[in-house]
């Protein structure tokens, strides 16, 4: 069954929906994104959700952050988290409709936002419109579901007799060849392509072979998410269900 964008919007507007249960993973995602952001930057956090990343990006010296989401439910949760910070502006924006935002951002962040658009043509449209809100030389930090990594991880799991981990019904993961073509066709520059393959391999590929209780808040997962382990094993995008594309707008 193919779901439409209206169903996805209704899903995220439900107050009892948790955006991410694996906090070790989301923290690793945010840390990876934040490692690319420089001091004194003007940042757009597009599809900011509950503001978990927004708070971190705003902690950079001299940063100003505009955090936007279509969902009032998500924004209310974000307000509770970021309300004490005066360098964050929250705004309700539906990126599928007309909207007004500045066009001089140093960085635009998309973290698990684009995958909630259920057609590639819509994903491509929103990506290009976001990039047009960067100043010349600005960078789009797009951390999204990565189809090739999903397939690699499921192939690994199959070797151990484990079933595949499906993509959730409200997500359409990105394909690298389509992003490569989008970058080439629009005179953009790919400055980085990274993933969290070590974490996914350890927590979704190896641990299930030995542990039937796959709760996320464990010491194993905490260690698997550490920079030391990631650098030691160094899988990058291999087995990673997520990828971070760093895309620079031409000067």
Image (cartoon, rainbow, N blue to C red):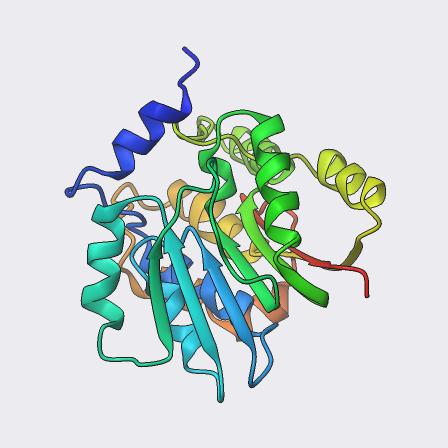
**Residue 239 visible in the shown view:** yes
Relative height, residue 233 to residue 215 (above, below): below
Question: Which residue is at a point 46% across and 65% down the rendered structure image?
Answer: 30
Relative height, residue 191 to residue 212 (above, below): below
Q: Position of residue 166 (x, y in %)?
A: 44, 28
Q: Nearer the viewer, residue 74 or 239?
A: 74
Position of the C terminus, as image quadrant, is bottom right
Q: Residue furthest left?
A: 16
Position of the N terminus, as image quadrant, is top left
Relative height, residue 161 to residue 74 (above, below): above
Q: Position of residue 42 (x, y in %)?
A: 54, 74
Q: Residue furthest bottom?
A: 61
Question: Which residue is at a point 61% across and 40% down the rendered structure image?
Answer: 149
Task: From the viewer's perspective, tell me whether residue 209 is left or right of residue 160.
Answer: left
Q: Position of residue 224 (x, y in %)?
A: 45, 63
Question: Which residue is at a point 54% across and 62% down the rendered structure image?
Answer: 102
Question: Which residue is at a point 35% across and 24% down the rendered structure image?
Answer: 6
Q: Nearer the viewer, residue 98 or 93?
A: 98
């Amino acid at each position: 069954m193919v779901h439409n964008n209206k169903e996805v919007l209704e899903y995220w507007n439900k107050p009892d929906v948790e955006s991410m249960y694996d906090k070790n993973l989301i923290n690793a995602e945010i840390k990876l994104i934040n490692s690319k952001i420089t001091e004194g930057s003007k940042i757009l956090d597009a599809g900011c959700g509950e503001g978990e990343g927004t708070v971190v990006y705003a902690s950079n010296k001299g940063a100003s952050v505009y955090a936007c989401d279509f969902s009032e439910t998500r924004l209310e949760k974000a307000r509770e988290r970021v309300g004490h910070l005066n360098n964050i502006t929250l705004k309700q924006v539906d990126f599928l409709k007309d909207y007004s935002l500045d066009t001089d951002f140093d960085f635009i962040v998309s973290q698990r936002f684009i995958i909630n658009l259920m057609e590639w043509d819509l994903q491509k449209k929103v990506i290009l419109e976001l990039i047009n809100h960067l100043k010349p030389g600005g960078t789009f930090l797009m951390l999204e579901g990565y189809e090739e990594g999903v397939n690699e991880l499921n192939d690994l799991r199959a070797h151990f007799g484990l079933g595949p981990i499906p993509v959730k019904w409200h997500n359409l993961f990105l394909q690298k060849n389509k992003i490569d073509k989008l970058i080439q066709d629009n005179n953009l520059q790919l400055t980085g392509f990274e993933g969290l393959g070590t974490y996914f391999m350890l927590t979704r590929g190896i641990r299930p072979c030995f542990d039937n209780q796959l709760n996320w808040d464990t010491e194993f997962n905490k260690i698997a998410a550490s920079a030391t382990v990631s650098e030691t094993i160094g899988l990058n995008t291999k087995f990673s269900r997520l990828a971070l594309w760093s895309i620079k707008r031409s000067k």
